Image (tube, helix red, strand yellow):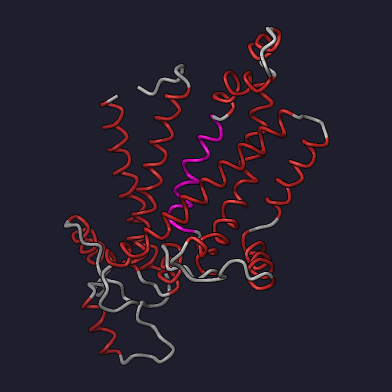
Amino acid sequence: MISFLIQRFLQSILVILLVVSGTFLLMRLAPGSPFATERKLPPKVEQTLLEKYDLDGNLGNQFLSYWGNLLKGQLGYSTKFEGRSVVEILKQALPKSLLLGFFSLVVALGLGILLGSYAAMNHQSWRDWIAMFLAFAGISLPVFVIAPLVVLLLGMQFRIFPVAGWGTLAHMFLPVLCLGGYYAAYCSRLMRASMLEVLDKSYIRTARSKGLRELYVIYKHAFKNAVLPLVSYSGPLAAHLFTGSMIVEEFFKIPGMGSFFVNGVLNRDVFLVGGSVIVYCTLLLAMNLFVDLLYVALDKRIKLW
């Protein structure tokens, strides 16, 4: 197992190195300048700013300077939010995105597993039809459509929840409902298909023929195998939700990772985008490793090392 973890660690370092390098080069090769504004700066002022952030000279020198700072543990300073380091911004934004992502993931997986299992247990009945109709409706309504609808209904019409901002559990309800509800639809479809496949196995028929209760058969014999595809999907889904949904954070005015990432790309803030990418990659790789280990714990037949 130790050799497996070392191998994955080295692979992760290589992946982060390639992704961060590619992001930096794409950001610097893209047209426009981090200091371009509606009011054009005098060339001398812009040159001074470029020198201040080590963004002057040829691309190779900029790249080496960027990686030299990264190896020292320095992510640089934002070119948009003057005087603020990328580490400081990420420290402020990441906890909000993690909290929002955690509750959204719980809703997505919890609701998806319940709805998908319920549909599979009532296959080809009106209950199955209603459950899958809800799943199709959820998939067909993207977040940017759901968000204005729930705000109009629950925020402005009935005034139950605040429509924007951050600070209390009430502020999180509508964003979590939009994010978690949307991905719960995908999870339920995945869970239903997997559960139907498992319920058709011979060992399930044998368990039923012994007169065991249906819920016991589902929980004891079917669930562990049926949930494996969902476990695979939950790794990248968790990384996506933990680093913030750009649309949801922008719409509900949540100062999280997604919001800062969008601002960084729009403003050519190369250091802020680079820092966000490092966090996203690290979370994605960590979640995938966690999913692999969970796979082994759920199914002893799987060997990773």
Residue 229 image offset from top left, x and y in percent: 56, 32
**Is 55 situated above or below 129?**
below
Q: Is residue 127 left or right of residue 27?
A: right
Q: Nearer the viewer, residue 254 or 281?
A: 254
Residue 286 image offset from top left, x and y in percent: 36, 42
Q: Quadrant of the N terminus?
A: top left
Residue drawn at x 19%, y 57% is 73
What span is colored magenta in the figure? 228-244
**Is 72 situated above or below 187?**
below
Magenta-drawn stretch, dominant element (helix, strand or loop): helix
Q: Is residue 54 left or right of residue 101?
A: left
**Is 276 situated above or below 136?**
below
Residue, far left:
72
Q: Is residue 13 left or right of residue 181?
A: left
**Is 13 situated above or below 123?**
below
Residue 14 image offset from top left, x and y in percent: 30, 44
Residue 39 image offset from top left, x and y in percent: 41, 92
